[in-house]
Amino acid sequence: MTIAEKIAAVRAEMARQDLAGFLVPRSDEHLGEYVPPSAERLAWLTGFTGSAGIAAVLTEQAGVWSDGRYVLQIANETDAAIWTHLHIAEEPPPAWVAARAGEAARIGYDPWLMSEESVARFAEAGLTMIAVDRNLVDLAWTDRPAPPMAKIMPHALALAGVSSADKRAQIGRVLADEKQEVAVLTDPASIAWLLNIRGQDIEFAPFALGFALLHADGGVEFFVEPEKVTDETRAHCGNGVAMAARDALPGAIAGLKGRRVRLDHSGAPAWFAQRLREAGAVIVPGADPCALPKACKNPTEQQGARAAHKRDAPALCRFLYWLTDAAGRETEISAAAQLRKFRAEVEGFAGESFAAIAGAGEDGAIIHYHATPRTDRAINPNEVFLIDSGGQYPDGTTDVTRTVWTGPGAPPAELRDQFTRVLKGHIAMATLVFPEKTAGVQIDALARQFLWQAGLDYDHGTGHGVGSFLSVHEGPISISKHLRPAVLAEGMIVSNEPGYYRVGHYGLRLENLLLVQKANVEGPKAFFVFETLTLAPFDRRLIDVSLLSTQEREWLDRYHARVLAEVGPAVPEETRHWLERACAPLGSA
Amino acid sequence: MTIAEKIAAVRAEMARQDLAGFLVPRSDEHLGEYVPPSAERLAWLTGFTGSAGIAAVLTEQAGVWSDGRYVLQIANETDAAIWTHLHIAEEPPPAWVAARAGEAARIGYDPWLMSEESVARFAEAGLTMIAVDRNLVDLAWTDRPAPPMAKIMPHALALAGVSSADKRAQIGRVLADEKQEVAVLTDPASIAWLLNIRGQDIEFAPFALGFALLHADGGVEFFVEPEKVTDETRAHCGNGVAMAARDALPGAIAGLKGRRVRLDHSGAPAWFAQRLREAGAVIVPGADPCALPKACKNPTEQQGARAAHKRDAPALCRFLYWLTDAAGRETEISAAAQLRKFRAEVEGFAGESFAAIAGAGEDGAIIHYHATPRTDRAINPNEVFLIDSGGQYPDGTTDVTRTVWTGPGAPPAELRDQFTRVLKGHIAMATLVFPEKTAGVQIDALARQFLWQAGLDYDHGTGHGVGSFLSVHEGPISISKHLRPAVLAEGMIVSNEPGYYRVGHYGLRLENLLLVQKANVEGPKAFFVFETLTLAPFDRRLIDVSLLSTQEREWLDRYHARVLAEVGPAVPEETRHWLERACAPLGSA
C-alpha cells in the first residue's frame, strides 16, 4: 500500500465511525520509547521512523509532529505533499487539530496508545474525544507483524542487589502509607525491576511486555502471555507473584470495585482510568511507585555500572583507533557495524542499548540520525564524524557519544571553537557540586553557558536517566529546560551530553554517563557530585586549549590519565599506543 | 491584649462557628506583599512581622509558617511556647493542619485573604474548608487601624511611555482574542500600570488599593473609595474608566451572569471565584493580563530606570563613604536613617522602595532583617555590615545591596573566600548571554555554582522582577529554584542578588538590578543579555582577587570604571576621592 492508500483507508473508517479525525501516536500499550514492530503504526502510516511523534489524520488534512531532534528526519522521511510537518512544542497537536477540525469535532483515538493526560489536552482544546474499539490503523494494516513472544529470564540477585520480595515489600509499604490498596504498573521496565526479571520482547531494552497489579501486601499479579514464562522464571518469581494471561487483565481491572487504586495518569494508557471508573474503583493519582527506587541504583548496581563501563570502554577505544584509518574507506553503516563487532566480543554483551547513531559530516547534524542503506554516506577525510552508541550488559547499560575529526588536515578554527564550547559545558556538568533537592532544569544551563555566549545552543536535553540493564532512557530525572519536579538523588545514573549542530555541515556531541554520589562536604545540607562512568578520550585535535581554564585543562588531563590507566591494559598493543597519544596531557599536545 | 488572649478570642469564635481551626495568612484583599496596617492580622495575632507567612490556630495547637528568609526572625518574634515554628516548604500547612485537626475537620478561612488555589491545597489534604463571613481576627481586634484613604495621582505619559487608552485597547484585544469578555484585576500594581495612576495607600509601593473589571472593548470599571479620586485624576483617566465605590463591587460581580470572565486563580482572592460561580458567570482561568506587559518595560520606562539609577547612585555612594567612618559610632538604625537622608536629597525621591535592611555582624545573617529599637546593634570595627535598600522615583524603582568590611583590620581569609564566591556568581549572572524562552529556574544555579563548589548555598532566590515606580517585587519572573514557567523577555528588570549567610556571624549579599536587552548575535534564535543598572562599588577589601578569572576581573574593573565615570561628577569632592580609590582597577589594589 502507498501512504496515500493507507490514509484513504483510515479516512474511510473515520467516515464509517463519523469521526473528523484520528490520532496515531508513536507508542505501544506501555507508552514507552521503544516499541515492537507490531506497534510501529506511525511509521507504517507516515514513513517517519523517529522514536517520538504523533500524526493526526483529518478529513482533508494530515499533520505529523515530532521534536527538535527529528526536524530534519521528518522532512526526509515523509511526503510534504501529504503531511504537514510540525514541531510538537511550537505548534502543539491539540490546537492545530481544533483549529482545522472545528470546535467540538469528534476525534478518534486508541485508548491503549495515549495517556488520559494527553487525551485531556485535546479535550481542553474543545474537541470531542472518542475512544475507538479497534485502532483504525490496525484495521487497514493487513500485514501487521505479530506481537513479540520472547522468553523471560531471571535477573540474578548478584546483579540486582535487592531481592524482588524485598522490593515488593518496600513498595507495598509505600502504598499502604499512602492509603492505596493496589498500584497499576504499565511500564515493563518497572515490572522488570520489581520482579528481577529481564526479557527480549523489543530491541535495545531487555524487558518483557506485560502489565502488573501490585498490592499493598507486596503481592503481584503479572499479566503476560504464558508462553513467555519458563519454569525457571516461575520459580524465580516465587509464590508472591501470580502469573495470569494478558487477556485476564480486563477481568482483573473490573474486579477492583471500591478499591483505592494508584494510577499514573501521564504514564498509563487512558484505557486503565476508563475501565477503573467503569468498575467503580477509587483512582488515586500517583506516579509509578517503582520509578524513583529503580532510578536510584543500589551499591550492587552502582558497582555493576562501573564494571560494565570498564568492559565497554576497550571496545569503544578499539573502535576509535580503528576510525583513525577509516576516512575514505568506510561508511556510517560499516563503522557502526564495526563498533558493534568490537562490543560483541565484550563479556556479557547482550545487544546494543539503542540503534547507534553514526553521522558523518552533515548527517551528524540530524540529532537522532539513523543511517539506512539509502542515506548511508562515506566517511570522508577532513570532516566531522559523530558516533553515539551503547551496550546492554547484565550488570549495566552504557551510552556514549564521541565526535572526531577524520583528518589528516587540521580542523577549521571555528569548528574547534564550537567543539571546545561543547566540551567546556560537558566539564562544567562533570565537575558540578550541587545540593540535595536539585531538579534537572536547575543545572541544564551550566552545560549550555559557553555556547550561549556565542549565540549557539542545542535543541535537546543535556541529560537523561539510564537504567541498570534496562532502558537507556529512564525516568524520572531529566536534565533539560523542561520544568519537571524530579530531583537528582544518590545512585541515579544520568547522561551528560551537550552538543552543537550546524545544519547541513556537522554535529558535535560529547556524552559520558554520570553517577550521582554524596559529596564530602560539611554543613547542614547534603551535597552531591557526579562520578564519571564512561571511559574514552575526547579528540584533542578538536580542542582549542587556549579556551580552557586551568581547572578545565586539569580535569581533562586527569580524566584522560584515568582512561589510559583503566582501558590501556585491556586493549591490543597498537590501540594502546594510540591511546597513550590520545590521552597524553594537553599541554604536550 | 496578650498573644494568649488574642488566640483565646479566636478560639472562642471558632467554637461558636463549630470550626476546628482558622487560618491567618499575611495578606490583604489583594494578596500582595505589602499590606496596610489594617491588614496586619498575622503580626497582630502572632508577633511575626515578616512579609510572608501564615498561621493556623487549632483548638489545642497553633502553628506559624514562613520561608527560609524568616527562620530566625520568626523564632525571635514569636513565643515558641504558644506557636510551633514551621518552614513553609518543609512542612506545608495543609498536611500539618490535616494531621492535627483530623480528617474532614472544618477549617475556617477568610475568602478575601486566600486564593482559590491555596484554599484548594487545604481541601486536597482532606480538610473541609469553610469561608467565614467576617474574619475571626477582626472580630477580636478592637483597635484595628482604619483602611488607608490616600489620594490617587496621575502618572504622566512622559514617564509611562504609553497612554492608558492604548494599554487598555491592547489588553482588551488580548481578551477578545482569547474569547474573554471581562478580566478581574485584583492587583493594585496592575491597575496602576493600566490606568497610568499612582497612589500612596501603603508604604513602599506607590499604588492605590482597589479592584477593577477590564472589558474586551478596553473599558474599565474601577472600584475604589471616591474620597481617593481627585478631579485631576478623574480627568486623567477619561471616559473609558468608570469610577465606582468599593462597595459596588459585589453588585457588579453579581451582574456577570453568562459572561466569560478571566480570573487568576492563584492571584485573586477566592471570594471572586465563589461569587462569580454564584452569579452564573463562566470563569476562564488565566493570569492577570497586565502582568506580562507591565513587566516588559517600554523604551521610556527603560530610559527612566537608567535615569533613576543614575540619580540614586550618588546617594548610595555618599552613604558608603560615610560608612567608612561609622564603625564604633553608629548603629544599624542610624545608618539606615543616614542613607534615607542622602536619598531624600535626590531629585524626585518619593520614599524608600522597601524598609532598608541594615544588618551588622550576626544580624546580617537574618535574610530580611529589619532593625527595631529593641534589636538595634552597634556597627563595630572589623566586622561585616550588609545594607539592602532602594528608592522610589517617578521614573523608576531601585533596589541595591552592598556588603562591606568595617575595618580597620583585614578580613579573615575564609570570609574573603565566601564573599568572592558570591561575587563570582553575581558576575556570572551579569555577563550571561541566554536564548529566548529561558525561564528563571534555568539560570538560577549560575549564580550559585561557586558557592556550591564549597558546599555553601543561600535559601532565597537569585532574582525578582522590579516595577517601574511600582512594587520592588514584581511578577511574573523569578530567578529561583521554583519551577515557574515565566520566561525572561526584553525590557524586564530583575535583581541579581546571590548571597551567603553564616548564622550567628554575618550575612553577605551583592545586589544590582539588571535590564534584559536583545543580544547582538546572529542566528535563528534571539539571544538576550543583561544591562546592569545599579552603580556602586563592591568592597575590594573583601575580594580575593586570586579566585577571579581574567574575565571576571576585567568585568569588575570595567564596572568600577563606569561607576566612577557616572557617579564621580555627582558627589562631593571627599566622596569622589574615596570613590576613585574604591573603583581603581583591582590589580593595583
Image: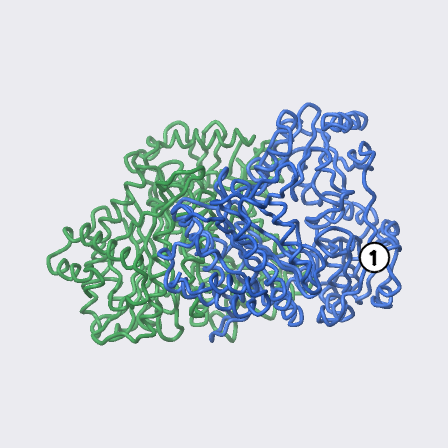
Chain colours: A green, B blue
Regarding residue A542, the answer to whether it shows in the image is yes
- Residue B130 screen position, x and y as percent: 76, 35
Relative to B45, B66 lies left or right:
left
Relative to A326, B565 lies left or right:
right
Chain under label 1?
A: B
- Residue A354 screen position, x and y as percent: 34, 56
Kindly state the secondary structure of the residue where label 1 is placed. loop
How packed is label 1: few (under 14 Cα within 10 Å), some, or many (20 or more)? some
Question: Observer-nearest residue: A414 or A359?
Answer: A414
User: Quadrant location of the N terminus of chain B?
Assistant: top right
What residue is shown with label 1?
A: B151
User: Quadrant location of the C terminus of chain B?
Assistant: bottom left
Question: Observer-nearest residue: B154 or B169?
Answer: B154
Regarding residue A39, the answer to whether it shows in the image is no
- Residue B549 screen position, x and y as percent: 37, 61
Q: How many marks?
A: 1
Q: Residue furthest top?
A: B60
What amino acid is found at the position of numbered circle 1 in the picture? Lys
Relative to B439, A145 lies left or right:
left
Above or below: residue A281 compared with residue B198: above
Question: Observer-nearest residue: A64 or B305?
Answer: B305
Examine the image and state in which quarter residue A74 appears: bottom left
Residue at image coords 29%, 38%: A159
Above or below: residue A91 compared with residue B405: below
- Residue A282 screen position, x and y as percent: 61, 35
